[in-house]
Amino acid sequence: MLEIRPNCECCDVDIAPSAVAYICTFECTWCPDCVERFPNRSCPNCGGDLQRRPTRPVAALINNSASTKRVVSPGCLEKVTGL
């Protein structure tokens, strides 16, 4: 079962379980704005293919809640923006 992480690993913006997000096979989670800045739209952590994260139906969230653990990739913004 997917973790459905609560934030973008690059910019740390909140991402609701029903919102558009992108994940790789390791479940690195990214917002659409950050994905647009990634070279080749690939995961900056593993280089993997990014796909839209599936949404979990609200009824399923009752017994299978989304993760509350925030993951942030140090230096991600600097890597992708060159700042």
Image (cartoon, grey):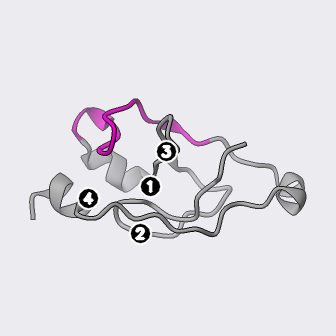
Residue 18 appears at what percent x and percent y? 68, 55
Question: What amino acid is found at the position of numbered circle 1 in the picture?
Answer: Cys
Q: CA distance from mark 3 to mark 1?
A: 6 Å
Figure quadrant of the N terminus: top right
Residue 46 appears at what percent x and percent y? 34, 38
Q: Residue at x 33, y 54 (%)?
A: 34
| Above or below for 40 versus 65 | above
Q: Residue furthest left?
A: 83
Residue 25 appears at what percent x and percent y? 50, 34
Question: What amino acid is found at the position of numbered circle 4 in the picture?
Answer: Cys
Which residues, given as a range, are shown in magenta? 39-53
Name the residue that disc number 3 marks: 22
Tag 2, which secondary structure? loop
Name the residue that disc number 4 marks: 76
Q: Neighbour class for label 1 at 10 Å: few (<14), some, many (≥20)? A: many
Question: What amino acid is found at the position of numbered circle 3 in the picture?
Answer: Tyr
Numbered disc in front, either 4 or 3: 4
Q: Residue at x 52, y 69 (%)?
A: 14
Q: Neighbour class for label 3 at 10 Å: few (<14), some, many (≥20)? A: many
Figure quadrant of the C terminus: bottom left
Tag 4, which secondary structure? helix
Tag 3, which secondary structure? strand
Looking at the image, tell me whether mark 4 or mark 1 is earlier in sequence order: 1
